[in-house]
């Protein structure tokens, strides 16, 4: 049986987005630091040189792994995702199938994601920052790899290009814009102003609050789990939410907490003349599941945003962005191939050094009869020169072959 060809790009991506899996499934894949460390150790048992990072956003959860055998590790990650769903979503008849991208397909997919072409809100800018945050976290947790670090540079360069060509210059584009649009459609008409609580003053929460304040009929009440001294009076601590909730018309939940920030205990005894609208854009979901059937609550999540009409991207900007993605993919492929070549040249050099400094003098002592030390040094020096000349010719031939390959590849584009 013929052995499979080695991937030129040692990268694989396994995961799911809003199109494949509902929030119920995606939230199960959001890992704690302990679980990320455990998963990384399991990968290292298969490949000690493996790298790993987890991209977790409102739209998607994807695991990126680097390895000399990315297809095999991708299958392990896929099996782990299915195991998590089987154990944590009992009774579900329709378990989604994770997507799996390997090699050049993984690079193309990741670049499309970073550019905002795969997002629920087409062209959103947040995803590029979220990708870099995920990579930074992997570096801090010491699970990253040189390949992931290099891809991070390509992703950052592409994000800047996307902004420069105007693909995502609209500050409304993003999950925050969709959530605000959804609330504006759903809230009933009011003679006065609607009071909207925004829980979570991270990037997305602040942007949502800003869009809401642009609406004259909206009064925004921002809440956050922690508040810097200079923001006291502008933001309210989350501990005040139980009292404030009685006078709110809606809540937008946008924290990064792994645990619910809105619980049944917080709303015990809360009087309501009309239901409280809750728009939950967190993954994991930010409201306790026991409240979702509470008659005082009208609950909506990211899944409900799928029904909103999408803004059309500028076709010219999209075409230019696709060309930049092609270029970045080519640069990254070249880096991977040249990195493999560098490893090969390093091994050749190490073998040559061992031969001429250890084996060659021993061979001369054992096989050649030299009358004195000067004769011995002369013979060893002459043979070393032959080896070095030959090694330099091999090195140059490999470099020429690589340059010829890229020259032909450039002409074929």
Image (spheres, helix red, strand yellow):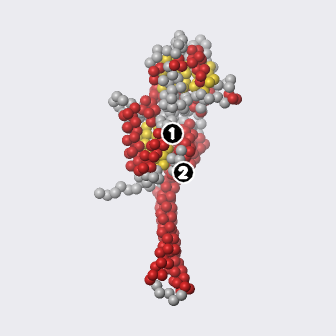
Please report whichever mark, 2 or 1, sits nearer to the chain's N-terminal start: 1
* Image location of residue 330, percent across then percent down: 50, 53
* Image location of residue 204, percent across then percent down: 57, 31
Near mark 2 (Cα within 10 A), the count class, few <14, some 14-19 or many ≥20, is few
Residue found 41% across the figure and 46% down from its top: 74
Q: CA distance from mark 2 to mark 1?
A: 23 Å
Residue found 52% across the figure and 77% down from its top: 384
Near mark 1 (Cα within 10 A), the count class, few <14, some 14-19 or many ≥20, is few
Left/right of residue 274 with respect to residue 235 in the rendered view = left
Residue found 46% across the figure and 85% down from its top: 368
Residue 270 falls in image quadrant: top right
- Asked whether the viewer can see residue 35, the reply is yes
Query: Are the residues at dot 2 and dot 1 in contact (C-beta closer than 8 Å)?
Result: no
Quadrant in which the N terminus appears: bottom left
User: On the image, numbered disc 1 is attached to which residue?
Assistant: 33
Instruction: Answer above or below: position of 1 versus 157.
Output: below
User: On the image, numbered disc 2 is attached to which residue?
Assistant: 150
* Image location of residue 89, percent across then percent down: 39, 30
* Image location of residue 267, percent across then percent down: 53, 17
Residue 135 falls in image quadrant: top right
**Is disc 1 placed on a helix, strand or loop?**
helix
Left/right of residue 53 with respect to residue 237 in the rendered view = left
């Amino acid at each position: 049986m013929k052995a499979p060809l080695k991937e030129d790009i040692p990268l694989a991506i396994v995961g799911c987005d809003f199109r494949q899996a509902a929030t119920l499934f995606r939230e199960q894949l959001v890992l704690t630091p302990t679980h990320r460390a455990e998963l990384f150790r399991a990968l290292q048992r298969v490949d000690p040189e493996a790298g790993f990072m987890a991209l977790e956003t409102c739209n998607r959860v994807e695991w990126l792994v680097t390895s000399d055998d990315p297809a095999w590790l991708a299958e392990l990650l896929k099996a782990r995702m299915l195991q998590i769903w089987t154990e944590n979503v009992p009774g579900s008849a329709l378990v989604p199938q994770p997507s799996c991208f390997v090699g050049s397909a993984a690079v193309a997919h990741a670049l499309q994601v970073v550019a905002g072409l795969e997002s629920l809100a087409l062209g959103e800018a947040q995803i590029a920052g979220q990708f870099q945050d995920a990579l930074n976290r992997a570096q801090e947790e010491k699970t990253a790899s040189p390949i992931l670090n290099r891809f991070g540079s390509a992703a950052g360069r592409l994000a800047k290009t996307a902004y420069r060509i105007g693909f995502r210059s609209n500050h409304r584009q993003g999950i925050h814009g969709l959530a605000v649009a959804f609330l504006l459609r759903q809230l009933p008409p009011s003679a006065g102003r609607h009071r909207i609580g925004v829980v979570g003053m991270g990037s997305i929460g602040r942007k949502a609050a800003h869009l809401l304040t642009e609406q004259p009929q909206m009064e925004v009440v921002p809440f956050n789990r922690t508040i810097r001294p200079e923001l006291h009076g502008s933001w309210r601590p989350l501990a005040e939410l139980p009292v404030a909730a009685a006078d709110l018309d809606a809540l937008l939940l946008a924290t990064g907490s792994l645990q619910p920030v809105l619980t049944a205990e917080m709303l015990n005894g809360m009087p309501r003349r009309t239901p409280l609208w809750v728009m939950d854009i967190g993954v994991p979901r930010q409201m306790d599941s026991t409240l979702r059937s509470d008659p005082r609550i009208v609950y909506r999540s990211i899944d409900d945003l799928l029904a909103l009409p999408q803004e059309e991207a500028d076709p010219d900007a999209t075409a230019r962005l696709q060309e930049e993605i092609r270029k970045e993919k080519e640069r990254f492929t070249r880096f991977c191939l040249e990195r493999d070549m560098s490893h090969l040249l390093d091994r050749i050099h190490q073998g040559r050094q061992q031969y001429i400094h250890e084996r060659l003098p021993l061979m001369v002592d054992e096989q050649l009869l030299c009358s004195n030390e000067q004769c011995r040094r002369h013979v060893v020096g002459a043979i070393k020169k032959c080896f070095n000349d030959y090694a330099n010719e091999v090195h140059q031939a490999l470099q020429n072959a690589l340059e010829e390959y890229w020259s032909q590849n450039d002409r074929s584009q």
